[in-house]
Image (cartoon, rainbow, N blue to C red):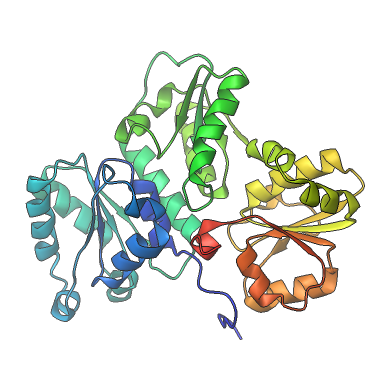
Amino acid sequence: MKGLRLYLPPFAPDTSGAASVFYPAGGMVVIIDAGGCAGNICGFDEPRWQNERNASPVFSAGLRDMDAIMGRDDRLLQKIRLASQEIPVRFAALISTPVPAVIGTDLRALQRMGERQLNLPVLTVDTDGTRLYDEGEEKAWLALFERFTRPLDPTIPQSIGVLGLTPMDFPRQDSQDLRRLLMDHGASHVVIYGTDNGLHDYESAAAIERNLVVSPAGLAAARYLEKTFHIPYTIDNPLMTDWLANQDDAAANTLAAAHTILIIHQQITANALREAIKAAYPDCKITCATWFQQHAALTQPGDLHLREEDDLIAAVTDQAPDVIIADPLFARALRDYAGRWIPFPHFAVSGGSH
């Protein structure tokens, strides 16, 4: 049955992905909802909310029934104006949810009205809460680069911009490890969009020499920057070689003895881990699977795109891999699996419950 979940919880939705991109950018994040979506984003899907107080403020529009029915956009803008007078912000980002999607809110008109009334740049993202986090991330990154990036001269030599890194995919330590790794391999300047300097990173993005895309959610932005500012990009997650090297002896012995492995994560990370394992164990057959964006150009024969819980169960039953490398939460749906499991957490899947 489509959408039926007996073992797995819903994954982080597109609204949460968009909010995660905007969260460190120095703007005001407004979730156009009655309160529930904003509560889920801050309480469950955004790990930085609990510990970091210097990032963007997140507000719920607090829509009431009559606000939704009558389309009272003026009241929403009045709330934003009052909040911006109390909290200094560089822009306002309005993230749509199921309510504005169902009633057909004109987000472009809302953006134009907002900029006239607020004297702030206003970005809108047409998420609807029914899609997955990576689609929201993709739309938010595009909105930021399209609005704020302008031509700059000269290019910063040996500079690298990292696209696609948020806590939805990567543990917090990964951004520091990736910066260190890139610097060790010759980069003089590394910008990890969405982690360091807020809006300044997006404003100065045209000065970056090349970009590195570490998740499919960053690919559309990389293509935009290449087309508009002629910045080339590569696709990889170079952290996977170190991840493999840092596994304990039990995991290393498990991989050395394996003939078939199934990796489940976002596509670029799964592919990079496959290449790292193949370099160490070239005779092993490895299949990558993802629940999220899957680009044909990055797909190898046999790779899987999972849509339903039953797809996961059927894939493991049919392939009977010796080893599964995935978030431990998936084990709930694979209780009859008799092989070995190597934990590979994915926050957008399990919310850190592991």
Q: Residue furthest front?
A: 249
Quadrant where the C terminus is found in the figure: bottom right
Q: Is residue 66 above or below residue 127?
A: below
Q: Determine whether, in the image, residue 247 is placed left or right of residue 214.
A: right
Q: Nearer the viewer, residue 324 or 138?
A: 324
Badge count: 0
Q: Is residue 9 above or below residue 192?
A: below
Q: Nearer the viewer, residue 13 or 172?
A: 172
Q: Position of residue 204 (x, y in %)?
A: 36, 26
Residue 344 visible in this rendered orientation of the protein? yes
Q: Position of residue 69 (x, y in %)?
A: 18, 79
Q: Determine whether, in the image, residue 7 is placed left or right of residue 119.
A: right
Residue occupying image coordinates x 84% and y 69%: 320
Q: Position of residue 56 (x, y in %)?
A: 26, 46
Q: Determine whether, in the image, residue 164 is placed left or right of residue 324.
A: left
Residue occupying image coordinates x 37% and y 50%: 48
